[in-house]
Image (spheres, helix red, strand yellow):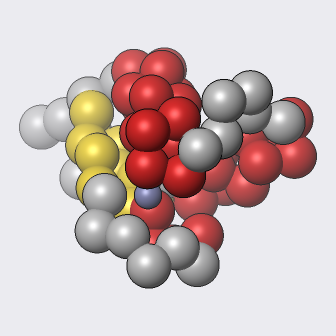
C-alpha cells in the first residue's frame, strides 16, 4: 500500500484540465512549475502562489 499525491489545476480556479500525480510530494512542484510556465505564463512563481498550490495538493491512499 502506498500513498500518492495529486494536484488539479482546476482546484485553484483555472479553467484547465491539468492534473498530475506522483508518489512523492516533492516530485509535484517542479512539474507544476513547468505547467504554469507554459499554460499560465507564470515565469517566476511567487511564494503565495506556491503556497496555494501546495495546499491544493491532495494525498490519497
Ligand atoms: Zn493549469
Q: Could one spot residue 25 in this view of the protein?
A: no
Q: Quadrant of the N terminus?
A: top left
Vertical position of residue 55 compared to residue 36: above or below: below
Q: Residue at x 28, y 68 (%)?
A: 17
Q: Could one spot residue 13 in this view of the protein?
A: yes
Vertical position of residue 27 compared to residue 59: above or below: above
Q: Residue at x 63, y 50 (%)?
A: 53
Q: Position of 24 compared to 1: left or right?
A: right
The image quarter containing residue 28 is top left
Q: Position of residue 47 (x, y in %)?
A: 86, 35
Q: Position of residue 12 (x, y in %)?
A: 59, 70
Vertical position of residue 43 compared to residue 51: above or below: above
* Depth check, front residue: 40 or 23: 40
The image quarter containing residue 45 is top right
* Depth check, front residue: 50 or 59: 50
Quarter of image, ligand 1: bottom left
Q: Position of residue 39 (x, y in %)?
A: 43, 49
Amino acid at each position: 500500500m502506498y500513498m500518492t499525491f495529486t494536484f488539479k489545476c482546476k482546484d485553484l480556479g483555472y479553467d484547465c484540465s491539468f492534473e498530475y500525480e506522483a508518489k512523492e510530494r516533492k516530485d509535484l512542484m517542479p512539474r507544476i512549475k513547468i505547467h504554469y510556465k507554459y499554460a499560465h505564463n507564470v515565469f517566476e512563481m511567487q511564494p503565495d502562489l506556491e503556497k496555494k498550490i501546495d495546499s491544493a495538493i491532495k494525498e490519497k491512499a
